[in-house]
Image (spheres, grey):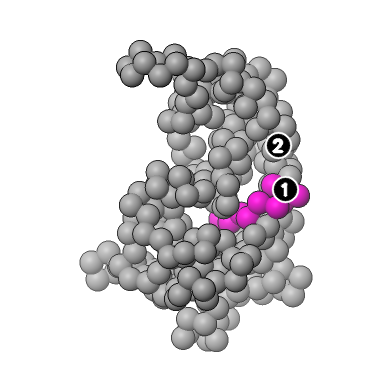
Amino acid sequence: MSDHAMGHDVVLETRGLTKRYGGVHALENANFVIRKGEHVAIMGDNGAGKSTFVRQITGVEQPTSGEIAFDGSVVNFDGPLDARRRGIEAVFQNLALADDLDVPSNLFLGREKIKFNLGPFSILDGKGMREATLQALKKTAVKIPNLSSTIRHMSGGQRQCVAIARTATFASKLIIMDEPTAALGVQETAQVENIVRTLKNNGEALILISHNMRQVFDLVDRIVVFRRGRIVANLNKSETDGQDVVAYITGAKTGAEFAEGAL
């Protein structure tokens, strides 16, 4: 894949992305594209290859073979920090928040604003981080009553919203959410879904990994189905339904047209 092969609006493209663990093919020949402003769902049973795919494109693991092009050029991320620096932000189920820190400290964890750089005795720009946090919450329509609260004292929904706000603050090009509402109640789920809609209105590209069919059809433009390590369907939401998607997930429909990896 040459860099010129990517359209100007393509944020991420994978060609023949493959990951093997010993003799196990966890991911085989995955060809995937997401464009600016597009929201794409990735669906499939446990073990279908969804998480393996995300670990490759976020730099958590290195592919066995294949290519990843991001923002117009072929990339080889040497780790998640590298992917983050390039503009990919991910919210995973374990959130990676610091329980004893407040909201601004969590938003800027590892990326603190420094007022005076004195090496180990540097002084943080608390005011700057607080103001940037307020802007981030406004951008994502996240409502946190008290920014000084530590994460430990927040509900699951508030914690998830902080993680998403952090993601949306720093993602310059692509946001990935892995089951963002799996452990949340109805109201908290609605809040997270509203954030996703706000990101859509802001023109942010987003990959949503979800088992929730209602959520997927409410929030995304396109659904990509993984089964046994392969992409078996690439469906426009307006041209499919839940029954069709389930048929691909379970193997009742085979996705034979993807056997050669043409997506």
Q: Is residue 210 magenta?
A: yes
Q: Residues within 10 Å of mark 1 (few under 14, many from 20)?
A: few
Question: Residue at point 27% right, 64% down?
Answer: 21
Residue kind at label 1, given as amino acid type: Asn
Q: Determine if residue 254 is in view.
A: no
Marks 2 and 1 sit apart, C-alpha to C-alpha, by 8 Å
Q: Which quadrant: the N terminus? A: bottom left
Question: Residue at point 58% right, 75% down?
Answer: 233
Q: Which quadrant: the C terminus? A: bottom right
Question: 174 or 161: nearer the eye?
Answer: 174
Could you say whether the residue bearing mark 1 is in a helix, strand or loop?
loop
Question: Residue at point 58% right, 47% down?
Answer: 172
Q: What stretch is highlighted in magenta?
A: 199-212
Q: Is residue 29 magenta?
A: no
Q: In this view, does 148 lie to the left or right of 138?
A: left
Which residue is denoted by mark 1 in the rendering? 202
Question: Does 31 appear above or below 112?
Answer: below
Check whether the beta carbons of the residues at disc 2 and disc 1 lie within 8 A of each other: yes
Q: Residue 4: x and y, percent? A: 51, 73
**Where, by quadrant of the figure, is residue 195 drawn?**
top right
